[in-house]
Amino acid sequence: MTPLNVGIGELAVVRGEDKSLRTLSLGSCVAIVVVDRVRAVLGLAHVVLPAVDDDARERRPVAYFTDVGVPLLLTELLRNGSGPRMGPLHIALVGGGRPGGGGATVFNIGERNVAAARHALKRFGLTPAVEDVGGPWSRTVTVDRGHIVVTCPDRAPLEL
């Protein structure tokens, strides 16, 4: 099964045992992953910045900003027969790192993205069950049959 690739600032929700999602090269960006194993629904948002900039909103993909991307992801979950009030969801946050240092370190974008994702989820009564955030790694996340696997160039694969 070939995963559906979720690009920078995009989100996707799929339903079915044979579906999978993937996002590549998370640096300071954060992947918000939602798995509903009961209903076989998977969701993933690849967010880039913590809060919407009204001047840039029209020029950016739909889930570019965390404070906008999380509600949109939850809305898509509902459209696919899942959601926070329908039963247990397995939620993971991945990314928010500082690969290569530089500007991501100076502005703490990765840390701010992680904090914004936690805050946005909390507004809906949700808390991540697991996180793989921070550090110097660039991460790729694959969600397949309800399993979340994080791979990095300098680290063994990690199942969340």
Image (cartoon, helix red, strand yellow):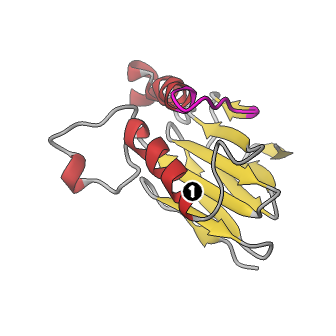
Q: Quadrant of the N terminus?
A: bottom right
- Numbered range of the magenta stretch: 121-130
| Label 1 crowd (10 A; few <14 / some 14-19 / many >=20) | some
Q: Position of residue 150 (x, y in %)?
A: 75, 48
Residue carrying label 1: 78
Q: Quadrant of residue 85?
A: top right
Residue in the foreground of this view, choosing between 113 and 129:
129
- Kindly identify the residue that appears in the image at 50 percent across and 36 percent down: 28
- Kindly identify the residue that appears in the image at 14 percent across and 41 percent down: 55
Q: Position of residue 122 (x, y in %)?
A: 56, 26
Residue in the foreground of this view, choosing between 135 and 92:
92
Can residue 24 be seen from the camera position used here? no
Q: Residue furthest front?
A: 85
Q: Give the vertical position of 126 relative to 88 (above or below).
A: above
Q: Residue furthest left?
A: 55
Q: Which type of secondary structure does the marked residue at label 1 adopt? A: helix
